[in-house]
């Protein structure tokens, strides 16, 4: 049986499971993510469930040795959830729309425990590796359903506040300038010294940020939407036994914010972990545009495609800095395997006319040669 390494936390887990009728369940660790959360798969009398174990605190500190104040400061700038309440609020919102997110079987919000419906193991990443869904669904079928889900979600607009269910509310953060600047510093702080072997100069930093100040209006264009933030292969499950949009299972949405409709579309069609060929990206982007024109009043295709390229470039730059940070600071070299894919996506985005100044700066200062 799985046990938490902290005896006090293990005792709290046992108390929680006893209180919600799951005492004696078989427990096995589930692969987690780069966060303070832990997951266990439970089985009791043939019934499966997932335990989310999330003690309150900053979820993604900038470095392990920078202290609690620095961790909270970064978490605040990046708008990262620091306890289970945002997950509960967004989960309830999604299921209320008829979408598939885990049902919350039991909760202890103060101690950070959730007992969740187990949505299974058919993660999109594995499906992409196999080339088809568990019932023979084509990848195009799965991509289209996922895009239709995004359009459905975007049609609901941008809720500023979501009820948690305990009388409190979760105020949705916005994709703002502070978050943008923090993300833009990642390639400057890590790609330059680790990959290029030199520090970014003050002049390079100033010009880089000035270019992004000019791009900011494109990132702010159009109506706001609820962005799930990490809508890509590790966080999407395919449920063949369901119908319509309910076939697309959603997890890991606690850091959702309000931002551009382009944000989640880029996350999905320029997946950081699995290669999306340029041909499939183009076809599915056209499919999104067609769905959006039919569903979203006043949809502006030109503005959306510009925002898509800009967010794609911003995402690509952040990731080419993140991979060497994980290598150098965190001792996780396997993430560098994603670098060629990330650079390929970045080159695709830089072809958009709106990114001419950024492309010239990258060509001169941050060469993307493999």
Image: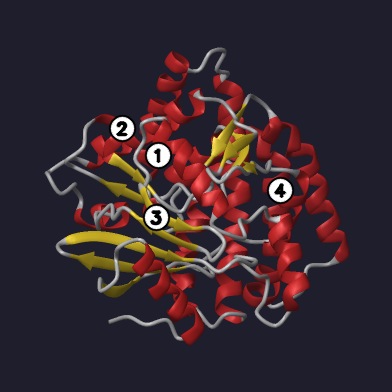
SS at mark 3 in the image:
strand
Query: Could you tell me which quadrant the N terminus lies in?
Result: bottom left
Colouring of the image: secondary structure
Looking at this view, is 344 or 118 the one in front?
Answer: 118
Pointers 1 and 2 in contact (C-beta within 8 Å): no
The mark found on residue 245 in the picture is 2
Q: Earlier in the sequence, mark 4 or mark 2?
A: 2
Residue under circle 3? Answer: 106
Residue under circle 4? Answer: 360
Mark 4 to mark 1 CA distance (whole Å):
24 Å
User: Outermost residue, front direction?
Assistant: 19
Q: Is residue 216 above or below residue 191?
A: above
Mark 3 against mark 2, which lies toward the viewer? 3
SS at mark 1 in the image:
helix
User: Outermost residue, left direction?
Assistant: 135
SS at mark 4 in the image:
helix
Mark 3 to mark 4 CA distance (whole Å):
53 Å
Pointers 4 and 1 in contact (C-beta within 8 Å): no
Residue count near mark 1 (Cα–Cα under 10 Å), binned few <14, some 14–19, many ≥20: some
Mark 4 against mark 2, which lies toward the viewer? 2
Mark 1 to mark 2 CA distance (whole Å):
20 Å
The mark found on residue 281 in the picture is 1
């Amino acid at each position: 049986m799985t046990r938490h390494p902290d005896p006090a936390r293990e005792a709290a887990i046992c108390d929680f499971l006893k209180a919600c009728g799951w005492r004696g369940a078989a427990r096995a660790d589930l692969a987690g993510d780069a966060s303070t959360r832990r997951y266990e798969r439970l089985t009791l009398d043939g019934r499966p469930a997932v335990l989310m174990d999330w003690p309150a605190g900053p979820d993604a500190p900038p470095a392990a040795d920078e202290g609690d104040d620095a961790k909270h400061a970064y978490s605040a700038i990046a708008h990262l959830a620091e306890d289970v309440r945002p997950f509960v609020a967004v989960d309830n919102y999604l299921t209320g729309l008829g979408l598939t997110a885990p049902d919350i079987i039991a909760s202890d919000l103060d101690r950070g425990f959730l007992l969740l419906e187990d949505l299974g193991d058919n993660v999109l990443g594995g499906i992409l590796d196999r080339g088809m869904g568990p019932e023979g669904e084509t990848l195009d079928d799965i991509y289209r359903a996922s895009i239709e889900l995004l359009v459905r979600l975007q049609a609901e607009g941008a809720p500023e506040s979501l009820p948690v269910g305990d009388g409190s509310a979760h105020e949705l953060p916005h994709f703002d300038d502070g978050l943008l600047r923090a993300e833009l510093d990642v390639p400057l702080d890590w790609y330059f010294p680790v990959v290029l072997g030199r520090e970014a100069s003050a002049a390079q930093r100033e010009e880089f940020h000035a270019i992004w100040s000019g791009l900011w209006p494109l990132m702010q264009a159009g109506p706001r939407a609820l962005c799930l933030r990490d809508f890509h292969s590790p966080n999407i499950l395919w449920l063949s036994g369901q119908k319509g949009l309910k076939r697309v299972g959603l997890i890991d949405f606690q850091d959702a914010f309000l931002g551009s409709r382009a944000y989640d579309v880029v996350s999905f069609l320029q997946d950081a972990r699995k290669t999306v060929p340029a041909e499939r990206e183009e076809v599915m982007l056209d499919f999104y545009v067609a769905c959006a024109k039919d569903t979203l009043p006043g949809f502006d295709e030109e503005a959306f495609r510009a925002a898509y390229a800009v967010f794609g470039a911003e995402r690509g730059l952040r990731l080419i800095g993140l991979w060497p940070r994980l290598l150098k600071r965190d001792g996780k070299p396997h993430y560098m395997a994603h670098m060629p894919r990330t650079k390929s996506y970045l080159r695709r985005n830089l072809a958009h006319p709106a990114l001419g100044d950024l492309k010239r700066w990258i060509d001169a200062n941050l060469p993307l040669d493999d």
